Image: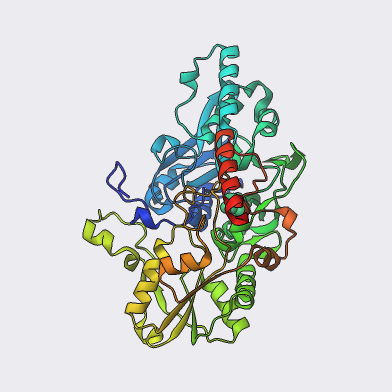
Amino acid sequence: MLRPDGRLSHDLDPQDKGPQDACGVFGVWAPGEEVAKLNYFGLFALQHRGQESAGISVSNGERIMVFKDMGLVSQVFDEPTLNSLNGHLAIGQCRYSTTGASVWSNAQPTFRATTSGGLALAHNGNLTNTDELERWLKERDASQEVPHKDRMDSTSDTALVTAIMATYSHLGVEGAALEVLPRLRGAFCFVFMDEHSLYAARDPQGIRPLVLGRLANGWVVASETAGLDIVGATFIREIEPGELITIDEGGLRSQRFAAADPKGCLFEYVYLARPDTQISNRRVHSVRVEIGRTLALEAPADADLVIPTPESGIPAAIGYADASGIPYGLGLTRNAYVGRTFIQPSNTIRQLGIRLKLNPIRDVIEGKKLVVVDDSIVRGNTQRALVKMLREAGAAEVHVRISSPPVQWPCFYGIDFATRAELIAPGLSTDEICRSIGADSLGYISLEGLVASTGLPKRSLCMACFDGVYPVEVPAGRAEKMRLEQAAVEQGANA
Ligand code: SF4
């Protein structure tokens, strides 16, 4: 998709967009270390969580500097820029936009100058009560006689939180956070800072992951454990749902701003998180292999070869092959770097569609009955093109197996799937979807099978995109609309 600056976003084909995560955050407090460079590498490890913009803010104890721009981490930062960001404390973020457009002013970290110093803040997640927060900020501005329009220079929910916190600057950043955090609803993992301290907070449901690590002479906070690994930090623990931590020369302090009510995102295990990341003491790769095993038992196929849709389908395909006894092979090669290009695609290039991303290995698949394991079906365009491509490359049969249940509902907690109208699953049976994508057979893992494969209790997970049960209230208008849609679906099922 073309952007105003003439670059392309990662959506070469807007009709073929997979689930998009809503950011990675990273923070480091480490006197004597090159904190900006540590942050840079941390964001590299989290790049899969957001590719639209990147930013780092650094404090040297006296002032905070922020550098951010549109693009990948490697496009935004170079050596001279990083060398100019000196200090002992830094936070960073790579963004995919949910609330607020993908424009420079919404890139993060956000920054506010307050009467007691600077405040920089970075966010992974999506808030669901932004209307209420907007009203709150207006009230605060009115009470402090600040013109509201002067307060807001961007349109993201993150900027709103930063602005509200700034109105409580007389309490210090920690006091302001304890005032504001309990009134936020939805998914939020924050890393934030003043000139002296690093702070991190996670919503009471712990919807998105956030972990704490230790360096020899400092601390690291990251969206995923893969962000700790890349900078050589030792995993200490997850930031608890409803917890605020503060790190400075006094050490680490922990406070609760809300009781924990865990509802971790089930989709992190299916697709979003890196396979080498650990969430709730489970290695994501191992969970995905287990999901593949369960899928093989629930949706067997008579086939010669199991192939994954790379990269995200690989662990589940390994599990499927293991449980089914069908050999595993790589039948598709991924063009790893094509998703982000500076070339403006003509219509001819757009029509190449999935071929820009995947290329079949004809020798492997020719004449074979294939099981193709993929992580999810959103609109169905990808799988339709994939099945066609495999048939053209000589596959005798194509049996599609999906390592998540049908995606039926939108996510309000930081994952951009599509609108409900764009999703293929609502209103269509599995057989109808199978016909729509042109496969010989189609099978999904059940929700019960998926949950069991994680080894986690169902009550501790959010699975709203599969079952429509939202653990945190979603925006009123949309909730109402969905209730009507849900009723229609239920009526149809009962008819
Ligand atoms: S709705 Fe789906 S993607 Fe969103 S947080 Fe819940 S499980 Fe994750």
Image height of 68 relative to 144, above or below: below
Q: What residue is at 36 percent from the left and 51 percent from the top?
A: 9
**Where does residue 463 sit, x and y in percent of width and height?**
64, 54
- Count of numbered tags: 0
Left or right, residue 381 beside residue 405: left
Question: 408 and 418: which one is in front?
Answer: 408
- Examine the rendering and report whether any part of residue 207 can be seen: yes
- Examine the rendering and report whether any part of residue 223 can be seen: no
**Where does residue 374 sit, x and y in percent of width and height?**
50, 69
Question: 218 and 55: which one is in front?
Answer: 55
Q: What residue is at 65 percent from the left and 30 percent from the top?
A: 173
**Where does residue 259 sit, x and y in percent of width and height?**
77, 41
Left or right, residue 67 beside residue 406: left
Image height of 173 relative to 201, above or below: above
**The quarter of the displayed image where residue 283 is located:** bottom right
Question: 70 and 140: which one is in front?
Answer: 140
**Where does residue 482 sit, x and y in percent of width and height?**
57, 42
Left or right, residue 262 beside residue 437: right
